[in-house]
Amino acid sequence: MIGLGVMGRNLLLNMADHGFAVVGFDLDSQKTSLLESSATPGTTVKGFNTLAEMVQALEKPRKMMMLVPAGKPVDDVIQSLLPLLEKGDIVIDGGNSHYTDTLRRVTFMEEKGFHFMGCGISGGEQGARTGPSIMPGGDSVAYKDVQPILEAVAAKVNGEPCVAYLGKGAAGHYVKMVHNGIEYAIMQLISETYDLLHRGLGLDNDELYKIYKNWNDGELQSFLVEITRDIFLKKDDKTGNRLVDMILDKAGAKGTGKWTSQDAMDLGVPIPVIDIAVCMREISAYKEERTQAAALYKTSSSDIPVPKEVFIQQVQDALYFAVIISYAQGLAQLHIASKELDMDIPMPQVVKVWRGGCIIRSSLLEIFFTAFQKNPALPNLLLEKDVAQLLHGKKQNLRNVIIHAVHMGYPVAGLMAALSYFDAYRSERMPTNLIQAQRDYFGAHTYQRIDEPGTFHTEWNK
């Protein structure tokens, strides 16, 4: 393992716990010492502070994974490794690299006789130690060599490891990118429900804990709802208040959500819930301007005029509906990208891998897994009858929540984007005929007709 930060160290210790002899490299001697001191007694774990020592300690063909920051650091490690490698050695990038960088590196390393794979890993530091979701792609020959290791350390669902070969080229990193886009969307949706219940109904953290606990015990069972539940009870050691109330409302981002949106636009795939989640994080960064605007427009919290228990149920249904839409959008992007980018992504395997270990794991994925097992070429989950039935039972409450939120001035951009996507996707006729007329009027962009084939242009101002 090259890079012994929390993720790299924990994943390597996980491998050691499963009977593999492992070595780690980091320039920081404290990190290599921590690796060795953290090892389970009886396991074979060794740390090195030079790449040459680490490479020499490995059996051939050597198997090396990088867990370093995306971008230039990955290229720097590759350049440092090149003089030390021999034909057939395997190098895996386990970080969050952009898939286009991975494609470039696959070609570069292949030309030199080395195997290179991009491998998405999700689950955070705890997942890395006890069982993450692993998304490898690219060199299928190399995957077979490392498959026993990855299957041993991955999370297990029904006894099956949450790892699978996910396609050619940069498929592994592409799947992880979309995973993170869905993660952005669901986090945004949960934050909107929190706002409606906290400011809109005036619920305190203890009440919120009970609500999210009930949701997680039921049909909304998922990692993100589970951790949301726990967050409400955490005390701030500085003030004694609940920590969530002391955290500034400015969100950070590492770019993977933005990459998902950018690539979806390039492919012509609509993913508006993911798009708006990225936008809302960006709006949050304008804290000073938002404070000025709040004073200028005299913004204040207004109570939601709905009985508490009724509104809580409406919000639960709204979240359930919008979360399904978020998954549907991300999976639709993977369906298109698989063909357009020649990655041959096996959709049933993607959903199977996401069922455990990863940040977006959810009981919903069992339903989606069944759908893709029945039809691996399913272009959109909304076309699956069982999924449609779930949405039918929740859509009116989503509309109700949005109506109340809009009327009282609460921003629910994610929920609104989910509903708008649903209403557009199920519309046999959209008003886009007018847009085509406008485009033809000012730019002679042409249009098609409903009554005969062909392409047409009209001189509109004559």
Image: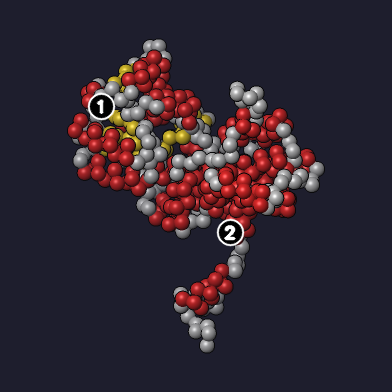
Q: Secondary structure at mark 1?
A: helix
> What residue sits right under mark 1 in the picture?
51
Give how far apart the Cα atoms at labels 2 and 1 are.
53 Å
At label 1, the amino acid type is Leu
Residue at 63 percent across and 53 percent down: it is 416
**Residue 119 seen in this snapshot:** no
Residue 59 sits in quarter: top left
Q: Residue 107 in the image: x percent, y percent?
A: 26, 45
Q: Residue 184 in the image: x percent, y percent?
A: 53, 43
**Residue 259 seen in this snapshot:** yes
The furthest residue to the top: 41
Residue at 39 percent across and 14 percent down: it is 37
344 sits to left or right of 348: left
Q: Earlier in the sequence, mark 2 or mark 1?
A: 1
For residue 184, above or below residue 436: above
At label 2, the amino acid type is Tyr
Residue at 47 percent across and 28 percent down: it is 125
Within-10-Å neighbours for mark 1: few <14, some 14–19, many 20+: some
Within-10-Å neighbours for mark 2: few <14, some 14–19, many 20+: some
**Label of residue 160 in the image:** none
Q: Residue 31 in the image: x percent, y percent?
A: 36, 21
Residue 73 sits in quarter: top left
**Label of residue 425 in the image:** 2
Q: Which label sits in the foreground, 2 or 1?
A: 1
User: Toward the viewer: 134 or 84?
Assistant: 84
117 sits to left or right of 420: left
